Amino acid sequence: MSFTPGLAGVIAAESSISSIDGQNGILRYRGIPIEELAEHSSFEEVAYLLLFGALPTAGQLSAFDTRLKENRSIPNGIVELLKSLPQEAHPMVALQTAVSALAAYFPHFDVENDQENEAAVVRMIACFPTIVASFDRVRKGLELLAPRSDLDHAANFLYMLNGEVPDEKQRRIIDVALVLHAEHGFNASTFTGRVVGSTTANPYGSLSAAVGSLSGPLHGGANERVLHMLAEIDGGVSGVEPWFTQAQAEKRKIMGLGHRVYKVKDPRATVLQGMARDLFASHGSTPLYDMAARLEEIAKERLGEKGIAPNVDFYSGLVYQKLGMEIDLFTPFFGISRIAGWGSHWIEQLKNNRIYRPTQLYVGETNATYTPMAER
Ligand code: ACO
């Protein structure tokens, strides 16, 4: 039996949802390259593709869209729960808590019922934005806004958050960001959701665990750390190199760089960088973008050989900040998108389920005896 720390390269299941070629920087959802989906598709269509395995017809997409809109509202009890949390709580904590509490309002006893499973996933895709926007408004003492069925998923989220309908460029950027983050194979949070799902736990418990996993700084939480990191660099663009040298001397991991699977630039980072450039050209630039671009250059020189390059989180935060999103909402926004992938994996897991139960390499004492308290 072999031992592989972090399970790197270990195949844990068969899946037909997405594929990644880490050497060449290629990501496909159900066989379709992410760049094509970013250019031509919408989050609703991608969620359908991930969940049902093929692109929808116009009629199927319209019916799916209606189902999503019908499921956007959250129970009053969940609103009260969000109000009861300390305002300083991280929104990922609020999201995880609310998602797990959905199980109390929508009891789900039979995970062998395909229709019930699908309904639970559709509900979560539909109401994640409502949970996140509601918590943000609760903590700011603002009135909650009901979802608007005349707006698509992306525009409705920004509306519920800011109280304003976004312009087309803002809406499109959010929609593309949702497409880019929706799925990524057996990453830590998806694996978490599948592991909990494999016990046949209820869908909300299974996927709230995935939310907890995504919150970690080594995973989804990296996007907000990228902005904190850029803010910590003194002297603008010319301060990046000395900062980088010191970070390397201290053996610090640079947030937004590196990936377990990609050994070249993450294709999602390339799309997001293009969107950032475009947004800053039309809505005014920020020194942080130039600093990030400089940091990428230095990283290429110094870490490129190791295959360390920008990942999806490197440029996403800059874009979200420009759109007025609070820094601590970046990771919840990631979750709003990734629930489409998590839900698809949860359903796939249950279709051919075997409980996950790996083994360990025991390195502890083997022959200890019980010492009475008085003799210790
Ligand atoms: N900055 C500097 N050096 C790095 C970085 C980084 N961000 N990432 C990896 N390295 C170096 C490591 O120090 C190590 O060097 P060594 O061989 O000399 O010891 C080598 O590259 C391999 O690194 P590992 O940590 O073994 O790579 P692993 O696959 O375990 O980790 C991870 C991948 C967690 C993403 C890591 O690159 C990291 O911590 N990055 C920063 C956090 C981040 O951006 N996370 C978001 C990932 S994308 C996502 O979840 C959506």
Image: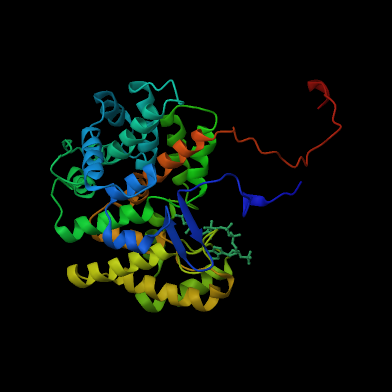
Toward the viewer: 131 or 115? 115
Q: In which quadrant of this rendering is ligand 1 seen?
A: bottom right
Residue 277: image location, x then y, percent: 28, 71
Q: Is residue 69 left or right of residue 198?
A: left
Q: Is residue 198 left or right of residue 371?
A: left
Toward the viewer: 239 or 16? 16
- What residue appears at the point 47 percent right and 36 percent down from the top-left corner? 209
**226 up-or-down from 101: above or below:** below
Quarter-wise, where is residue 115 in the image? Answer: top left
Quarter-wise, where is residue 355 in the image? Answer: top right
Q: How is the image coloured?
A: rainbow
Quarter-wise, where is residue 169 in the image? Answer: bottom left
- What residue appears at the point 44 percent right and 55 percent down from the top-left corner? 222
- What residue appears at the point 47 percent right and 66 percent down from the top-left corner? 25
Residue 331: image location, x then y, percent: 37, 49
Residue 337 appears in the picture as rendered: no
Residue 326: image location, x then y, percent: 28, 51
Toward the viewer: 355 or 294? 355
